Image: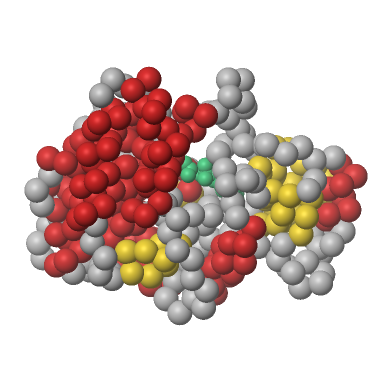
Amino acid sequence: MAVYTDITEDDLARFLSEYEAGTLLSYKGIAEGVENSNFLLHTTKGAFILTLYEKRVDPKDLPFFLGLMHHLADRGLNCPLPLSRKDGELLGELSGRPAAMISFLEGTWLRKPAAKHCREVGRALAEMHLAGQGFALSRKNALSVDGWRPLWEKSAARADEVEPGLQDEIAEELAFLESHWPKTLPHGIIHADLFPDNVFFIGDQLSGLIDFYFACNDAYAYDVVTCLNAWCFEKDGSFNMTKGMALLDGYEQVRPLNGAELKSLPLLARGSALRFFLTRLYDWLMTPPGALVVKKDPLEYLRKLRFHRQVKSAEEYGLVHR
Ligand SMILES: Nc1ncnc2c1ncn2[C@@H]1O[C@H](COP(=O)(O)OP(=O)(O)OP(=O)(O)O)[C@@H](O)[C@H]1O
Ligand SMILES: N[C@@H](CCO)C(=O)O
């Protein structure tokens, strides 16, 4: 689930009256997602998503996220749009949280993506990278290499509860990545969380990208490896090279990767696996029993990290030289 904050019908009707979005017919909480509270609303003017931003989102970042969706949509990317209120603001407040009304994007996310879908995702990711150019605001990636150690320190002492030996393994990995992390790769706006649940399809056609709440400025290739991790591994933990090939090919049809980016892929993939391992580990250890949120398995990302440690070149991900 993700409904951390409850709303009352009266408060919601009052909130809606700030918009030209019709009057409320029905609303319900959306169980998916882990970061924010989301509701599906039906009004006399159609369907909308209402998002209440929860504690992991810094309110200072909201103009960046909401402005970015407008910037990308203006450049032709299919993504939801935050609605303006009658006073021109994109953000309001509901039940004590910052809140926004977002246009409803048709489609559903794929539980079992195939190689053809990975190609579409690669293409859409590269289109997003190009469309993000020229966006006036910027945001540092709080969950890149500088952010990993503080996050790790919150869980390190209890890491061996999850798997014996983890504390030493991750300490070594972190030290290695901190000293080898590439700093000069082509960079710009990245999505930073383009997992299957954030990509909608209608049939086999990609209908749009959602959830820009980790978007930030970072290396484009880092976004590529986050997708390789999220889309190209099978449930048994094996890497599917056909999917990797499709994803990289789709990406390169729109934005070819340069030599430095290709060379860095295995290292970046380790870093991205560590980032998702660390946030999952923190949630795994800290979420109180009984909380209405589905915790994600940190060990899935530990296995991916270990796989990438053995990879020597981008060819092992399916890269085909043109
Ligand atoms: N604009 C939209 N149109 C249609 N459905 C949406 C839209 N935005 C969100 N949803 C629905 O709400 C769910 C949760 O949204 P989202 O992924 O943004 O939440 P989150 O809490 O930020 O999640 P995450 O764990 O991915 O960070 C989505 O899986 C989707 O079902
Ligand atoms: N996509 C993330 C959760 C939301 O950021 C994960 O799978 O760990």
Asked which quadrant contains residue 320, the reply is bottom left
Q: Is residue 241 above or below residue 303?
A: below
226, 103: nearer the viewer: 226
Please give left or right for residue 277 compared with residue 5 in the image. left
The reply to whether residue 266 is visible in this rendering is yes
Q: Is residue 193 above or below residue 322?
A: above
Residue 33's spot in the image, x, y percent?
Answer: 55, 40
Residue 37's spot in the image, x, y percent?
Answer: 66, 42
Q: Is residue 136 above or below residue 169?
A: below
Residue 222's spot in the image, x, y percent?
Answer: 31, 57
Residue at x 23% of width, y 61% of height: 182
Please give left or right for residue 45 compared with residue 56 in the image. right
Residue at x 64% of width, y 58% of height: 59
50, 136: nearer the viewer: 136
Q: Quadrant of the C terminus?
A: bottom left
91, 16: nearer the viewer: 91
Asked which quadrant contains residue 122, the reply is bottom left
The reply to whether residue 253 is visible in this rendering is no
Residue 144's spot in the image, x, y percent?
Answer: 37, 54
Asked which quadrant contains residue 46, the reply is bottom right
